[in-house]
Image: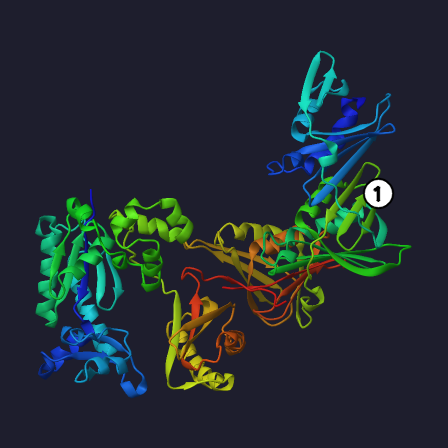
Amino acid sequence: MAKKIIHVDMDCFYAAVAVRDNPELAGKPVAVGGAKDRRGVIATCNYEARAYGVRSAMATAQALKLCPHLILAKGDMNLYKSISQQVRAIFQQYTDKIEPLSLDEAYLDVSDCQAFNGSATLIAQAIREEIYQQTQLTASAGVAPNKFIAKIASDENKPNGICVVPPDKVTDFVAALPLRKIPGVGKVTAKKLANMGLETTADVRVFSQKELIDRFGKFAYALIERSHGIDDRELCLHRDRKSIGVEHTLAQDIFSEREIQQVIEPLFDELCKRIDAKKQSKHIKKQVLKLKFNDFQSTTIEKTVSELKKSHFMALLQAVLSRQKGRSIRLVGLSVGLTDSDITEQQLSFSF
Amino acid sequence: MKFAISREDILKPLQLATGTVERRHTLPILSNVLLDINDGVLSITGTDLEVELIASVELVQASEDGRITVPAKKLFDICKGLNDSALIEFNLMDNKLVIKSGRSKYSLSTLAAKDFPNLEEWQSEINFAISQKSLRGLIDKTSFAMAVQDVRYYLNGMSLETQDQTIRCVTTDGHRLALSQTQLENESLDESQVIIPRKGVTEILRLIDDSEDNIYVSVGSNHIRLTSDNFTFTSKLVDGRFPDYRRVLPKDGDKTVTGEKDYLKQAFSRAAILSNEKFRGVRLNLISNELTITANNPEQEVAEEVVDVNYTGDDLEIGFNVAYILDVLNALQSDEVKITLGDANSSALIEDNKDDSAVYVVMPMRL
């Protein structure tokens, strides 16, 4: 029997919270993000702001160019977390099979839920209603036989909408979907696909599978499956943390190795604090240094390590500088990759 | 080409040569052995381009010289399947090797001998003789610690060093290191160090036995050759820099434990049963004259073993991969083992208490 998956997505979550708590903002373009003079970026914006072309992850400076009267609200992570927990508690009334994607998004598998005679549509409606009652925030939902369709569906009737794709309508739903909508197809992949004449799922379905596989490897299988509306992935109920990182967009671009070292110093302390807080210091398997240049290109370099050391980052920095090519640096990030959380045993190696 | 030989005379050299032939090869001639009759001597050659083995046997019966290659496995299976005392006649006719023995007759396909790959010419720079027993001992004590398909390709083999009277073998996979050495009387060898690839090492172990018979070793810059009365074995060397074992041998270990090897081996083997199957970690707790070994697994099962040892240092807790410890205990010869430790993050030096012909270094695990 087909599964019943609901994808619940809070409508412009951070911005909606800001408007809820400051009613005078209602109806005005509002965004949450960092200040322009600190080179911040937009985290979320409401639909009034989107009308001006403001998007999340856009530099605040650019957003203000598009929409000069944009109201910039400050984020409040703790508040978002507590609302997210509230919403999760609502999900738990219906199922334990919950895969949170972020604070404002989750998949639910309600295949085994008996409420409303097992109608996933009615469950989704009840969840949206309950979220609004408890938080005065709206959520949109997609209901479908798999994660991929559910996720796209939740976007169909946003905001405050629902879209149901029953199993017999999946084929119609993916008949000619732009490939950009498939999770995993970003700007770059979409462009590569377009260069091959592939714009929609219909194009992929009739294209040579072999050629796709040669070109994209494992990803080709996912692409072909999704183009047929197939997605067998189960919900990930226990997501292991794979990395811990800190990064800092600099108030001013820097250029020299010395300057970057000075940024790394405090960042490293911050990283150590975070790793300690999450009790992960024994699970570190690699260190990653990230730089973003003033042309917004970023680069990362990593090293497998058995122990976290500042000197490793400094060595990585030396190695990565050959990629600088005269550009100045606007962001420095440090992170560590973690071993699977069930690995508590770690073999040490010789240092030859 | 024409010759006759008894089954028992051809079987051993044929088996040796066939052993180096890879089962599945892209180049058809590499599944063949080269048969070469020259002046009453039959030489059988097998190769995989990395190693080459030539086994020779003198023919008692009259023969006609010639060279040809035939499928190794089929030839071996045919000869092996004949009666113990059978006399086998070989005759090359129209590109087929016809094999006759009693009422059995086989016709094998052939490929031209001129297409059979030869190792390039090379010069040996170091030459010495060593008893098969000594060489076998050197390799037996260390081969288990060779890396397997490591990206650091130079670890997938065995370092062989000569220095004056000393022959030294070193292997390491990055987590543990094994070193064995022996002295050759009446030799004064130049200093040299080469890496024999893994396949070469396992082949050598297959070829040599525990006898006092000498084997002659020649080492060039890219090849090593072992010559005995029955065979000539040549292996290419790994081109790379082997890590310096002197940098790995721990120097500041101040905690010395000695104990009965067999008791320790048994205790570790039992504790290993309940160690994590993937990571194989066991915890060692040392207090005065007592070693406690504990292991547990994801199913929350727990093993604890207490062993009497000689130890007077500070208390210490340290973790190890139990498989690495057992490999070492299995390679040690004498009854008493000595373990020298520093702290929980430093390597352990393990050796025979009375014999310094082999030492082992094992890095700990963080548990």
Residue B61 showing in the rendered view: yes
Determine which quarter of the picture holds residue B250: bottom right
In-image side of B162 versus A96 (left or right): right
Residues B291 and B103: in front is B103
Residue A222 image offset from top left, x and y in percent: 33, 51
How many marks are shown on the rendered structure? Answer: 1
Mark 1, secondary structure of its residue? loop
In-image side of A33 versus B128 (left or right): left
Q: Amino acid at mark 1?
A: Glu
Residues B365 and B159: in front is B159
Which residue sits at x=53%, y=52%? B272
Q: Which residue is mark 1?
A: B212
Residue A334 image offset from top left, x and y in percent: 43, 75
- Quarter of the rendering occupied by the N terminus of chain B: top right
Residues B254 and A345: in front is A345
Which residue sits at x=81%, y=22%? B3
Q: Chain of mark 1?
A: B
Residue A209 sits above or below residue A149 on the image: above
Determine which quarter of the picture holds residue B70: top right
